[in-house]
Amino acid sequence: MQDSGDKEMQHRPRRIAMYVIYDKDGKLDRFRKYYLQELRKEVDTIVGVVSGTLTPESRDELAKLTDDFFVRENKGLLAGSWIDGIAHIGWDTLAEYDELLM
């Protein structure tokens, strides 16, 4: 007899998350690190989209918490970040997943 937990794991959709970050000082704040750690429990892939700049220390931390990230000019508001994030990931890669979390 299968455990209900096993059944849930078998039917879990493949998820990719796009996490947009802006910080005027270029720092990856503690609450963002916590969020990314918790998000990791729910998704297969995390792509960080940084609008603006990041300190070298924050880049190193973000590299450990995401599967991929890139830094873009801070323009186009939040929708611009999503558009650039989708372009960065690519439609072919997105098609490999069941859900995109933004």
Image (cartoon, grey):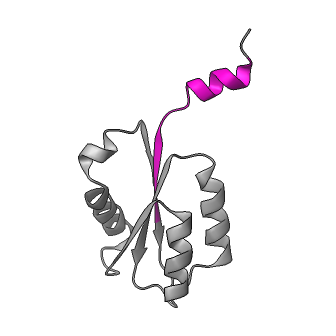
- The residue under the point 62% across, 79% down is 29
Closer to the camera in the image, 61 or 79: 61
> Residue at position x 66%, y 56% from top?
38
| Residue 101 x, y percent position in the rendering | 47, 49
1 relative position to 100: left or right:
right
Residue name at image x 60 percent, y 62 percent = 36
* Residue 50 shows in the view: yes
Which x, y percent locates residue 52? 39, 83
Q: Compared with residue 97, is residue 21 higher up or lower down, i.e. above or below?
A: below
Q: Nearer the viewer, residue 79 or 35?
A: 35
Residue 30: percent from the left, percent from the top?
Answer: 67, 76
In the image, residue 57 lies in the stretch drawn in magenta: no
The stretch in magenta equals: 3-19
Q: In which quadrant is the C terminus drawn?
A: bottom left
**In the rendering, at what x and y percent does residue 13 appear?**
50, 33
Pick the quarter of the image with the N terminus. Answer: top right
Residue 85 found in image quarter:
bottom left
| Residue 18 falls inside the magenta stretch | yes
Residue at image position (31%, 39%) is: 95
The answer to whether 56 is drawn above or below residue 60 in the figure is: below
